[in-house]
Amino acid sequence: MTTKQPRVAIVFPADAKEQRPTKVEKSRFAGIVEALGGGGIEVVGAPFADEFVEEVRAQLLNVDGVLVWFNPIEGGRDRSILNAMLMEVASKGVFVSAHPEVIDKIGTKDVLYRTRTMSWGCDTRLYATLDAMRAELPASLAAGAPRVLKQIRGQSGDGVWKVEVADPPGSPPTMILLETALRIRHAKRGSEEETTTLGGFLSRCQPYFAGGGMIDQAYQSRLPDGMVRCYVVRDRVAGFGEQLVNALYPAAPETPMGEAPQPGPRHYFPPSRPDFQRLKEKLEREWLDELCQLLGLEKSQLPVLWDADFLYGPKDVDGVDTFVLCEINVSSVYPFPADALAPLAAETLAQIKAGR
């Protein structure tokens, strides 16, 4: 008896000019197609836009698995139509990664608040409404240290702000009013530091509450040491990325803030990079168990491919680096190290076989 070759569809944004016929093997996902094919999987492309939802649904109901690369916002639209369709397809027995319910649990900034008690956490607050932020942010800023405010759903630095009191006195201010001057800097590429009032900043943040609110975290003073990204295939680190100059990187001393460097490239490394082995071990042997327990997930539900960004925290009593979670990316992890291709293909095949 011959075994039917498994079929996987790759869902990615349709080219508006081409009205959907983009060939996945000629897209940026060509390496993924090759890796899956090498694992014995037939791959079909499923370029998606809201207008094509019925066509794509019919296509996905005729495959064994679906891998999705689609940002939270594409072309000014959210994923609500796509997510509803993917959940329907998954309910019919088709393997979908990342499943929208899993994205909701680990793929938004809310995960920073829900896991704040873990050793990767820091002082983190959640503002579910603008009124809550208006009432509670002044106390957060009154300590005198910078904060980082992040909209719960966003990408590419949009809605991420470094915020601090402008020209604070020798001791931390005791009262922050709507008229209090703040220094703010958007993490979106090309942004520079500016000055506004607390009231002005709150007004600027109002649109973010349509997407679920904002997270308020302590600014990490070791941000200039770089950011480490762990690329994870389900529950195993499959590679690393290192970005030495990242968003919100400060200007050099005695240099105007307008001259702060813009984010630099991310460099990719295999999972064997020696100086990241402690981080890899913490993530695989400790943090993933805690994450799943806190969020009510089984490890088998984790996406085929996802990543976690870490900033360096304070060194511990032995002088060893600690790490603070900055965000988790699930919706559209690309690019990623070539070392992750073979594990990605193997995990996809294993998930399909487990569901048969």
Image: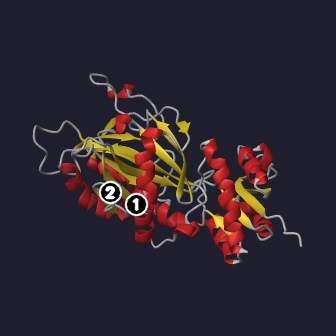
**Can I make out residue 228 in this image?**
yes
**Residue 217 in the image: x percent, y percent?**
32, 52
Task: Provide residue 157's location: percent of width, then percent of height.
Answer: 47, 45
Q: What kind of residue is marked 1?
A: Glu
Quadrant (top left, top right, bottom left, bottom right) of the C terminus: bottom right
Q: Nearer the viewer, residue 206 or 253?
A: 253
Q: Residue at x 78, y 67 (%)?
A: 63
Q: Measured from the top left, where is residue 256 in percent x and y?
A: 32, 24
Q: Residues within 10 Å of mark 2 (few under 14, many from 20)?
A: some
Question: Residue 48, percent across and down?
Answer: 72, 57
Residue at the limit of the structure toward the top, as seen here: 254
Mark 2 touching mark 1, by CB under 8 A? yes
Given the current orientation, which residue lies at the most extreme right position?
Answer: 1
Counting residues from the N terminus, which is met first, the one under dot 2 or under dot 1? 2
Q: Which residue is mark 1?
A: 286
Quadrant placement of the N terminus: bottom right
Q: Which mark is residue 119?
A: 2
